[in-house]
Image (cartoon, rainbow, N blue to C red):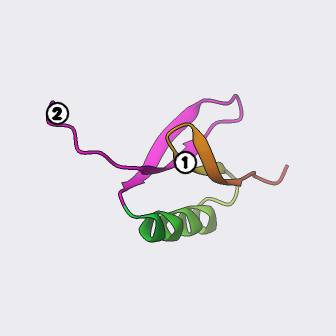
Amino acid sequence: MGGKIPHDWRIEMWSVGGAIERCLATCDRLDIAIAAYEQAIATFPEKNVTLRQGSRVIREHRAQA
C-alpha cells in the first residue's frame, strides 16, 4: 500500500487560468465532503471551487465575474 491513506473526495480552489490553487480538504465520507464544499463556497464566493472524486466533478462553483 505504500503508506498512502486514500481519500475519495477533494475540495479544490481553482485559479482563473484553470490550475488548482490549493486543496482545501480531502475526505473519505461524501456527507463531510459536501459540508466542506458548501463552507468553502460560503468562505470564498469569489473563487472557483470544485468537489471531485478523482477526475469526476461532483459539484462546481463558478465565481461571478
Q: Nearer the viewer, mark 2 or mark 1?
A: 2
Asked whether the residues under the numbered discs 2 and 1 touch, taking CB atoms below 8 Å apart as contact, a structural biologist would say no
Q: Looking at the picture, how far across and down is residue 53, in whole percent?
A: 51, 47
Q: Looking at the picture, how far across and down is residue 22, in whole percent?
A: 48, 41
Q: Looking at the picture, how far across and down is residue 41, in whole percent?
A: 62, 62
Name the residue at 55% across, 62% down.
37
The alpha-carbon separation of the residues under discs 2 and 1 comes to 23 Å
Q: Which mark is residue 52?
A: 1
Name the residue at 48% across, 65% down.
36
Magenta residue span: 1-28
Tell me the residue that label 2 is attached to.
1
Q: Is residue 9 left or right of residue 19?
A: left
Name the residue at 15% across, 30% down.
2
How many residues crowd mark 1 within 10 Å: few (<14), some (14–19), many (20+)?
A: some
| First-in-chain label (2 vs 1) | 2
Judging depth in this view, the residue of 42 and 4 nearest the camera is 4
Q: Looking at the picture, how far across and down is residue 26, in whole percent?
A: 39, 52
Amino acid at pointer 2: Met
Q: Secondary structure at mark 2?
A: loop
